[in-house]
Image (cartoon, rainbow, N blue to C red):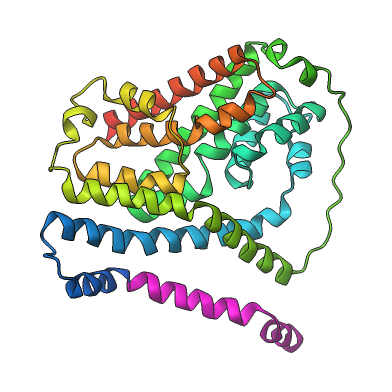
Amino acid sequence: MLGWFYKMTKGPIPIYLLLLIAWVALYISLAPLADLIVSFLPVDPASHLGEAIAFFIYDTPKVLLLLSAVVFVMGIINTWFTPERTRSLLAGRSLGLANVLAASLGIVTPFCSCSAVPLFIGFVQAGVPLGVTFSFLIAAPMVNEIALTLLFGLFGWKIALLYLGLGLMVAIFGGLLLGRMNLEKHLEKWVQDIPAKQLSFESEKVAFSQRLTAGSLAVKDVVGKVWVYILLGIGVGAFIHGYVPENFMASFMGKEAWWSVPLAVLIGIPMYSSAAGIIPVVQALLAKGAALGTALAFMMSVVALSLPEMIILRKVLTVRLIGVFISIVASGILLVGLIFNLVL
């Protein structure tokens, strides 16, 4: 026991414990600090500009703190996952179970749209069925740890859990449906000709201090890439919060407008943003009268069907297969939005 305590106090762990204490103290102090900063500005806090500035000052550190915490934790978890291990876990599984596993792995694995092509090729080589691959590709961007953490922090665990369940449903059943359509012939010819190969994974022991370092590097990498999108998203959200009249969004994004969810999906598909960048916009839309299902359908379509990912996937999928993929996922998101609006 004494030896274990000595190792703990001599390594980097005390530093991370101090950082954790500082993180908690700062997070608890965000609201009073934001109010204090706004009070020193030559702006009326009740004015449109004052409300917009207050929104931006409060939400920016809140989102960045939540993002940093979850990326750090997932960076540690991801030291147990590599592309080869992910492929090995999916290869050879029965359909249905493989789709569930693929969608679940999509949540915890650190792969984004930039990884779409090499992952797709790796799955083909490992003999992973096309429908199972699509379950993974749907879940990875849409139901990721960043979206879940921010939804939990901003809206509570019930909304985050409902989003998780419905998002997994879209990924699982979307993959099953795509798998049953026998679309392998619509892969690009060079992908169809890739020979299958056996994969093996040798687990290696990694010291916990190295996993902590991996978490720190993940924060530096991920936050370093998305902070601009976060500021842009919060900036848009601040403008909506400060200047858009109350209940204005309800006129075309409320429950009463039957076409609001389809319109939100159509608007979201050609757009691009990370989950971290779009959630503050969703928060502001809801505050101005938008229905939750409509706002989440918009968010899911932006994140899960981003234009850059479709362009990248064009290297391995024909235009027809991409069209089928978009249609099925968009239909699932549409269903999710309508369910949210019905039950909430």
- x then y, percent, for residue 85: 77, 44
The residue lying at 69 percent from left, 32 percent from top is: 117
Along the horizontal axis of the image, is 322 left or right of 47? Answer: right
Along the horizontal axis of the image, is 80 left or right of 236? Answer: right
Q: Main secondary structure of the magenta part?
A: helix
The residue lying at 68 percent from left, 12 percent from top is: 186
Q: Visible in this render: residue 331?
A: yes
The front one of 8 and 299 is: 299
Q: Reply above or below: 292 against 128.
A: below
Q: Quadrant of the N terminus?
A: bottom right
Q: Which residue range is magenta in the image?
A: 1-29
- x then y, percent, for residue 327: 49, 17
- The quadrant holding residue 88 is top right
Q: Quadrant of the C terminus?
A: top left
Along the horizontal axis of the image, is 196 left or right of 242? Answer: right
The residue lying at 66 percent from left, 12 percent from top is: 183
The front one of 41 and 104 is: 41
Q: Reply above or below: 50 against 309.
A: below
Q: How many marks?
A: 0
Q: Reply above or below: 265 against 295.
A: above
